[in-house]
């Protein structure tokens, strides 16, 4: 018998995402654009789901924006294969990458008031 796969989505809502940008006081136009970016990011993450998920546990995550301490606010997205062993594999941001199938950062620049996606 084949074990059924499990996909867990831990994705903040668009409202939560925009609320995490409240400190920069988005204009109505910027908030509308943030909703579009949120929707596009969620769809991008879902595209990285493996074709075959039977017997696998896959997590999809999208976080709220966090202040980087500089001019950027950063939200992280990732698709993880939870059945891969966790190894001592870190990127320069200190993130463990051993279970990643895909990862991205969405950046809001407080000075230019622009969003950018980094994969």
Image (tube, rainbow, N blue to C red):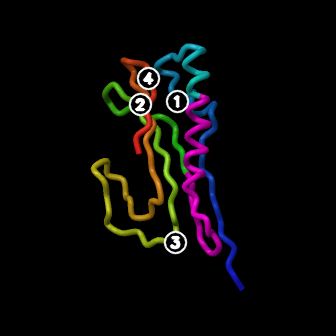
Which is closer to the viewer, label 4 or label 2?
A: 4
Residue 74: image location, x then y, percent: 42, 35
Q: Earlier in the sequence, mark 3 or mark 4?
A: 3
Quadrant in which residue 35 is drawn: top right
Horizontal side, residue 6 vs residue 92: left or right: right
x 42%, y 33%: residue: 107
Q: CA distance from mark 3 to mark 4?
A: 36 Å
In reply to whether residue 45 is colored magenta, the answer given is yes
Horizontal side, residue 4 vs residue 84: left or right: right
x 61%, y 44%: residue: 43
Looking at the rendering, the stretch of residues picked out in magenta corresponds to 35-60
Residue that label 4 marks: 114
Residue that label 1 marks: 20
Q: Earlier in the sequence, mark 1 or mark 2?
A: 1
Q: Earlier in the sequence, mark 4 or mark 2?
A: 2
Q: Earlier in the sequence, mark 3 or mark 1?
A: 1
Residue 105: image location, x then y, percent: 43, 41
Name, please, the residue furthest toward the right: 1
């Amino acid at each position: 018998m084949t074990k059924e796969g499990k996909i867990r989505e831990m994705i903040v809502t668009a409202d939560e995402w925009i609320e995490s940008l409240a400190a920069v006081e988005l204009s109505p136009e910027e908030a509308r654009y943030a909703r579009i970016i949120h929707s596009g990011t969620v769809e991008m993450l879902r595209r990285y789901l493996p074709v075959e998920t039977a017997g696998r546990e896959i997590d999809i995550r999208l976080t709220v924006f966090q202040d980087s301490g500089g001019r950027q606010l950063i939200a992280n997205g990732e698709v993880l294969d939870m059945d891969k062993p966790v190894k001592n594999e870190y990127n320069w941001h200190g993130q463990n990458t051993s279970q990643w199938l895909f990862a991205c950062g969405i950046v809001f620049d407080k000075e230019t008031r622009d969003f950018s996606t980094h994969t």
